[in-house]
Image (tube, helix red, strand yellow):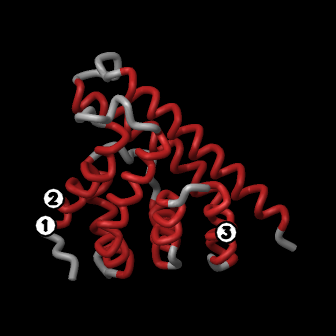
Amino acid sequence: MVNPFTAGTKIRKIQQDVLRPLYTMYPGQEAAKFSWLLVETGRAISHHRPFMEEVCRSHLVAIIFKIIKLLGGADQLTEEDFTRFTSYVNDGGIKAMVKMLLSADKEKTFIDELAELPPDVRENAPPMLTKSKSLHSDFITGFFKEVYDSVEKTPQKLHDNFAKSDDFINRLAFLAAENQKKIP
């Protein structure tokens, strides 16, 4: 059961764990390939997936939404976006995302997993991914300022990871939109 009194702390921990592979410096990070960092991110998400799914099934989801906004980095997040995300999680989207991040052929796995989701979730994918790119940009910029005091002081490798992540999200949004065109 989700405890509303500890949810903020838990969400902060999830954010740190999920951001660590791509957006913090640690031994071996400098030499790590982007595709491997995505796998590590997938593992972090997988570890916290049960909590995310429980939150999205919980009647406390509105409170959690407010906590996320309060923690910062999601000022653009609307209730409609949160509802869209909740639907995505409840319909197996996080599970599909983890499978894609852990796979060797991420694009093929993304398309295959997208095909397995309900039609309304598939239709929701392009706008959700487009919005997630905007949120990603705001959130990571805020994270860099918090951790490194400014975006300018952030190590170049992390800037590179950020640019590659943006490109990756753009590619997924494009694939989702193209996939929608193919469905009768």
Residue placed under numbered mark 2 in the picture: 9
Which numbered dot is residue 112? 3
Q: Residue at x 35, y 70 (%)?
A: 49
The image shows residue 104 at horizontal and vertical percentages of 56, 56
Which numbered dot is residue 142? none
Q: Earlier in the sequence, mark 2 or mark 3?
A: 2
Q: Nearer the viewer, mark 3 or mark 1?
A: 3
Q: Nearer the viewer, residue 46 or 103?
A: 103
Residue placed under numbered mark 1 in the picture: 6
Distance between the alpha carbons at the discs numbered 2 and 3: 35 Å
The image shows residue 98 at horizontal and vertical percentages of 46, 64
Q: Earlier in the sequence, mark 3 or mark 1?
A: 1
* Quadrant where the N terminus is found in the figure: bottom left
Residue type (three-letter) at the residue carrying disc 1: Thr
In the picture as drawn, the residue positioned furthest to the right comes out as 184
Residue type (three-letter) at the residue carrying disc 3: Asp
Q: Are marks 1 and 2 in contact (CB under 8 Å)?
A: yes
The image shows residue 27 at horizontal and vertical percentages of 23, 34
Q: Residue at x 39, y 26 (%)?
A: 157
Q: Nearer the viewer, mark 2 or mark 3?
A: 3
Q: Is 107 placed left or right of 49 in the picture?
A: right
Identify whether 89 is placed above or below 173: below
